[in-house]
Protein backbone atom coordinates (compact mmCIF):
# COMPACT_ATOMS: atom_id res chain seq x y z
CA UNK A 1 0.00 0.00 0.00
CA UNK A 2 1.15 3.50 -0.79
CA UNK A 3 0.27 6.01 1.89
CA UNK A 4 0.19 9.79 1.56
CA UNK A 5 1.24 11.52 4.78
CA UNK A 6 0.88 15.26 5.36
CA UNK A 7 0.75 17.59 8.35
CA UNK A 8 0.51 21.19 9.51
CA UNK A 9 -1.87 22.38 6.82
CA UNK A 10 -2.68 25.44 8.90
CA UNK A 11 -5.75 26.54 6.97
CA UNK A 12 -3.75 27.08 3.77
CA UNK A 13 -6.33 26.06 1.19
CA UNK A 14 -4.21 26.75 -1.89
CA UNK A 15 -1.41 24.56 -0.60
CA UNK A 16 -3.74 21.76 0.50
CA UNK A 17 -5.40 21.60 -2.91
CA UNK A 18 -2.06 21.37 -4.72
CA UNK A 19 -0.83 18.65 -2.36
CA UNK A 20 -3.95 16.58 -2.91
CA UNK A 21 -3.58 17.01 -6.69
CA UNK A 22 -0.02 15.75 -6.36
CA UNK A 23 -1.12 12.69 -4.37
CA UNK A 24 -4.07 11.82 -6.61
CA UNK A 25 -3.52 8.45 -8.29
CA UNK A 26 -0.26 7.89 -6.40
CA UNK A 27 -1.60 6.70 -3.03
CA UNK A 28 -4.43 4.57 -1.68
CA UNK A 29 -4.87 6.31 1.66
CA UNK A 30 -4.03 9.69 3.20
CA UNK A 31 -3.05 10.45 6.80
CA UNK A 32 -3.10 13.99 8.20
CA UNK A 33 -0.86 14.57 11.23
CA UNK A 34 -2.76 17.43 12.85
CA UNK A 35 -2.86 21.23 12.81
CA UNK A 36 -5.31 21.44 9.95
CA UNK A 37 -6.23 24.88 11.30
CA UNK A 38 -4.50 27.89 12.84
CA UNK A 39 -2.45 30.68 11.24
CA UNK A 40 -4.09 30.46 7.80
CA UNK A 41 -7.16 32.09 6.24
CA UNK A 42 -9.37 29.12 5.26
CA UNK A 43 -9.97 26.86 8.28
CA UNK A 44 -13.54 25.77 7.44
CA UNK A 45 -12.69 24.71 3.91
CA UNK A 46 -9.60 22.76 5.02
CA UNK A 47 -11.54 20.87 7.69
CA UNK A 48 -14.18 19.84 5.17
CA UNK A 49 -11.58 18.66 2.66
CA UNK A 50 -9.53 16.52 5.04
CA UNK A 51 -12.68 14.98 6.50
CA UNK A 52 -13.59 13.91 2.99
CA UNK A 53 -10.20 12.88 1.63
CA UNK A 54 -8.20 11.42 4.54
CA UNK A 55 -8.35 7.99 6.14
CA UNK A 56 -6.95 9.38 9.40
CA UNK A 57 -6.97 12.95 10.69
CA UNK A 58 -5.15 13.61 13.96
CA UNK A 59 -5.60 16.41 16.43
CA UNK A 60 -2.72 18.88 16.67
CA UNK A 61 -1.94 21.44 19.33
CA UNK A 62 -3.91 24.09 17.43
CA UNK A 63 -7.04 21.93 17.42
CA UNK A 64 -6.45 21.23 21.11
CA UNK A 65 -6.25 24.94 21.87
CA UNK A 66 -9.54 25.66 20.15
CA UNK A 67 -11.39 22.65 21.58
CA UNK A 68 -10.36 23.52 25.14
CA UNK A 69 -10.46 27.29 24.62
CA UNK A 70 -6.97 27.39 26.12
CA UNK A 71 -4.35 29.52 24.39
CA UNK A 72 -1.82 29.65 27.22
CA UNK A 73 0.75 27.51 25.36
CA UNK A 74 0.72 29.75 22.28
CA UNK A 75 2.66 32.87 21.42
CA UNK A 76 0.59 35.98 20.81
CA UNK A 77 0.47 35.50 17.05
CA UNK A 78 -0.86 31.97 17.53
CA UNK A 79 -3.46 33.08 20.06
CA UNK A 80 -4.73 35.84 17.76
CA UNK A 81 -5.08 33.47 14.81
CA UNK A 82 -6.77 30.76 16.90
CA UNK A 83 -9.32 33.13 18.41
CA UNK A 84 -10.11 34.34 14.89
CA UNK A 85 -10.24 30.74 13.61
CA UNK A 86 -12.73 29.67 16.25
CA UNK A 87 -15.10 32.42 15.13
CA UNK A 88 -15.02 31.01 11.58
CA UNK A 89 -16.02 27.46 12.54
CA UNK A 90 -19.57 26.24 13.00
CA UNK A 91 -20.67 23.95 15.81
CA UNK A 92 -20.49 20.85 13.61
CA UNK A 93 -16.89 21.56 12.65
CA UNK A 94 -15.94 22.16 16.27
CA UNK A 95 -17.46 18.80 17.17
CA UNK A 96 -15.52 17.14 14.33
CA UNK A 97 -12.11 18.37 15.42
CA UNK A 98 -12.88 17.37 19.00
CA UNK A 99 -13.26 13.75 17.85
CA UNK A 100 -9.92 13.64 16.03
CA UNK A 101 -7.53 11.31 17.95
CA UNK A 102 -4.12 12.33 19.27
CA UNK A 103 -2.45 9.15 18.03
CA UNK A 104 -3.14 6.45 15.45
CA UNK A 105 -1.54 3.18 14.36
CA UNK A 106 -1.51 1.24 11.11
CA UNK A 107 0.52 -1.93 10.54
CA UNK A 108 4.10 -1.13 11.63
CA UNK A 109 3.50 2.63 11.82
CA UNK A 110 2.54 5.11 14.53
CA UNK A 111 1.25 8.58 13.72
CA UNK A 112 1.33 11.56 16.11
CA UNK A 113 1.48 15.31 15.71
CA UNK A 114 4.43 16.08 17.97
CA UNK A 115 5.97 13.08 19.71
CA UNK A 116 5.16 9.81 21.45
CA UNK A 117 5.89 11.22 24.90
CA UNK A 118 3.77 14.33 24.31
CA UNK A 119 1.61 13.80 21.20
CA UNK A 120 0.51 17.42 20.86
CA UNK A 121 3.20 19.64 22.28
CA UNK A 122 6.78 18.31 22.28
CA UNK A 123 9.04 19.50 19.46
CA UNK A 124 11.68 17.15 18.10
CA UNK A 125 14.50 19.12 16.51
CA UNK A 126 17.68 17.25 17.40
CA UNK A 127 19.01 13.83 18.38
CA UNK A 128 18.83 14.60 22.10
CA UNK A 129 15.09 15.17 21.74
CA UNK A 130 14.69 11.58 20.49
CA UNK A 131 16.20 9.60 23.36
CA UNK A 132 12.89 9.29 25.21
CA UNK A 133 10.97 8.83 21.96
CA UNK A 134 12.95 5.81 20.75
CA UNK A 135 12.54 4.23 24.19
CA UNK A 136 8.77 4.50 23.69
CA UNK A 137 8.74 3.42 20.02
CA UNK A 138 7.28 -0.08 19.65
CA UNK A 139 6.65 0.03 15.89
CA UNK A 140 9.01 0.28 12.93
CA UNK A 141 8.42 3.97 12.32
CA UNK A 142 6.74 6.96 13.93
CA UNK A 143 5.63 9.76 11.61
CA UNK A 144 5.46 13.23 13.13
CA UNK A 145 5.06 16.89 12.14
CA UNK A 146 4.77 19.94 14.48
CA UNK A 147 8.19 21.56 13.86
CA UNK A 148 7.33 22.44 10.22
CA UNK A 149 10.84 21.24 9.32
CA UNK A 150 11.12 17.93 7.42
CA UNK A 151 13.76 15.35 8.27
CA UNK A 152 14.14 12.43 10.62
CA UNK A 153 16.10 10.18 12.91
CA UNK A 154 16.95 6.50 13.10
CA UNK A 155 18.34 4.14 15.74
CA UNK A 156 19.70 0.65 15.22
CA UNK A 157 18.07 -2.06 17.27
CA UNK A 158 20.10 -2.83 20.39
CA UNK A 159 22.33 0.24 20.04
CA UNK A 160 22.24 3.67 21.70
CA UNK A 161 23.49 5.83 18.82
CA UNK A 162 20.87 8.01 17.12
CA UNK A 163 21.46 9.26 13.57
CA UNK A 164 19.84 12.37 12.16
CA UNK A 165 18.40 12.21 8.64
CA UNK A 166 18.42 15.34 6.50
CA UNK A 167 16.67 16.53 3.37
CA UNK A 168 18.76 17.41 0.34
CA UNK A 169 19.42 20.98 -0.84
CA UNK A 170 16.01 21.09 -2.55
CA UNK A 171 14.20 20.12 0.63
CA UNK A 172 13.40 16.60 -0.52
CA UNK A 173 14.24 13.28 1.07
CA UNK A 174 14.34 9.70 -0.14
CA UNK A 175 15.17 6.66 1.95
CA UNK A 176 14.47 2.97 2.36
CA UNK A 177 13.71 1.86 5.89
CA UNK A 178 16.16 -0.87 6.91
CA UNK A 179 15.00 -3.92 8.88
CA UNK A 180 17.30 -3.46 11.86
CA UNK A 181 16.54 0.23 12.44
CA UNK A 182 13.70 2.17 14.06
CA UNK A 183 12.71 5.52 12.58
CA UNK A 184 11.14 8.83 13.54
CA UNK A 185 10.30 10.79 10.41
CA UNK A 186 9.06 14.38 10.26
CA UNK A 187 6.96 15.04 7.16
CA UNK A 188 7.25 18.82 7.41
CA UNK A 189 4.40 21.22 6.72
CA UNK A 190 1.86 21.61 3.96
CA UNK A 191 0.76 25.13 4.79
CA UNK A 192 3.67 26.84 6.52
CA UNK A 193 7.10 25.21 5.94
CA UNK A 194 9.89 26.73 8.02
CA UNK A 195 13.06 25.44 6.38
CA UNK A 196 13.49 28.46 4.14
CA UNK A 197 11.73 26.89 1.17
CA UNK A 198 8.19 28.17 0.46
CA UNK A 199 7.05 24.88 -1.07
CA UNK A 200 4.62 22.41 0.52
CA UNK A 201 5.89 19.16 2.00
CA UNK A 202 4.17 15.98 0.81
CA UNK A 203 5.25 12.45 1.73
CA UNK A 204 4.56 9.00 0.31
CA UNK A 205 5.43 5.81 2.15
CA UNK A 206 5.25 2.44 0.41
CA UNK A 207 4.46 -0.14 3.09
CA UNK A 208 5.59 -3.02 0.87
CA UNK A 209 8.98 -1.77 -0.28
CA UNK A 210 9.54 0.39 2.86
CA UNK A 211 10.49 3.30 0.62
CA UNK A 212 9.79 6.80 1.90
CA UNK A 213 9.81 9.90 -0.30
CA UNK A 214 9.30 13.48 0.77
CA UNK A 215 8.49 15.84 -2.08
CA UNK A 216 8.12 19.61 -2.37
CA UNK A 217 5.12 21.02 -4.19
CA UNK A 218 4.86 24.56 -5.50
CA UNK A 219 1.58 26.38 -4.91
CA UNK A 220 0.33 29.99 -5.31
CA UNK A 221 1.60 31.23 -1.93
CA UNK A 222 0.94 34.84 -2.81
CA UNK A 223 -2.80 34.15 -2.95
CA UNK A 224 -2.67 32.72 0.57
CA UNK A 225 -0.57 35.65 1.79
CA UNK A 226 -3.04 38.17 0.38
CA UNK A 227 -5.93 36.32 2.00
CA UNK A 228 -4.16 36.50 5.36
CA UNK A 229 -3.77 40.26 5.01
CA UNK A 230 -7.32 40.67 3.68
CA UNK A 231 -8.79 38.85 6.68
CA UNK A 232 -6.76 41.06 9.03
CA UNK A 233 -4.68 38.25 10.46
CA UNK A 234 -1.13 39.21 11.58
CA UNK A 235 0.99 40.23 8.59
CA UNK A 236 3.87 38.13 9.92
CA UNK A 237 1.86 35.06 8.93
CA UNK A 238 1.78 36.26 5.34
CA UNK A 239 5.58 36.69 5.33
CA UNK A 240 6.02 33.17 6.71
CA UNK A 241 4.07 31.77 3.81
CA UNK A 242 5.93 33.85 1.24
CA UNK A 243 9.40 33.01 2.55
CA UNK A 244 9.01 29.56 4.12
CA UNK A 245 10.11 30.73 7.57
Image: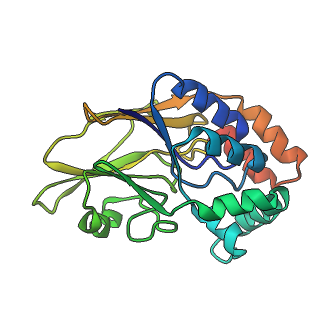
Residue 99 in view in this figure: yes
**How many marks can you see?**
0
Residue 194 to residue 207: above or below: below
Query: Quadrant of residue 190 in the image?
Result: top right
The single residue placed furthest to the left in the displayed view is 158
**Left or right: 90 as drawn, with respect to 139:** right
Residue 168 visible in image: no
Q: Residue at x 72, y 38 (%)?
A: 13
Residue 169 placement, left or right of 82 = left
Q: Choose between 91 and 3: the one closer to the eye.
A: 91
Name the residue: 88% across, 53% down. 232
Specify whether 177 is left or right of 87.
left
For this orientation, the residue located farthest to the top is: 25
Q: Position of residue 132 (x, y in %)?
A: 30, 70
| The one of 173 and 56 positioned closer to us in this rendering | 56
Q: Quadrant of the N terminus?
A: top left
Q: Residue at x 69, y 76 (%)?
A: 70
In this image, 138 relative to 121: left or right?
left
Q: Give percent across and percent down for residue 131.
A: 27, 67
**Rendered view: 22 above or below 91:** above
User: Considering only vertical position in the picture, is 238 above or below 70?
Assistant: above
The colour scheme is rainbow
Vertically, is 189 above or below 93?
above
Question: Which residue is at a point 58% across and 31% down the rendered structure image?
Answer: 19
Picture coordinates of residue 176, whole percent (x, y): 25, 35
Q: Position of residue 148 (x, y in %)?
A: 53, 50
Amino acid sequence: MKLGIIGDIHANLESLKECLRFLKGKVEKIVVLGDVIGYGPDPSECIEIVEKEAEIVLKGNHEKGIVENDYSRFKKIGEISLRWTKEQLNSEQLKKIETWPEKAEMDDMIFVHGSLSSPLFKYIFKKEDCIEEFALLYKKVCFIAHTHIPGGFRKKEGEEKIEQLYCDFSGKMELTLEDDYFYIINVGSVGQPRDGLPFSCVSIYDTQTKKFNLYRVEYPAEITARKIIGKKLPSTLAERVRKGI
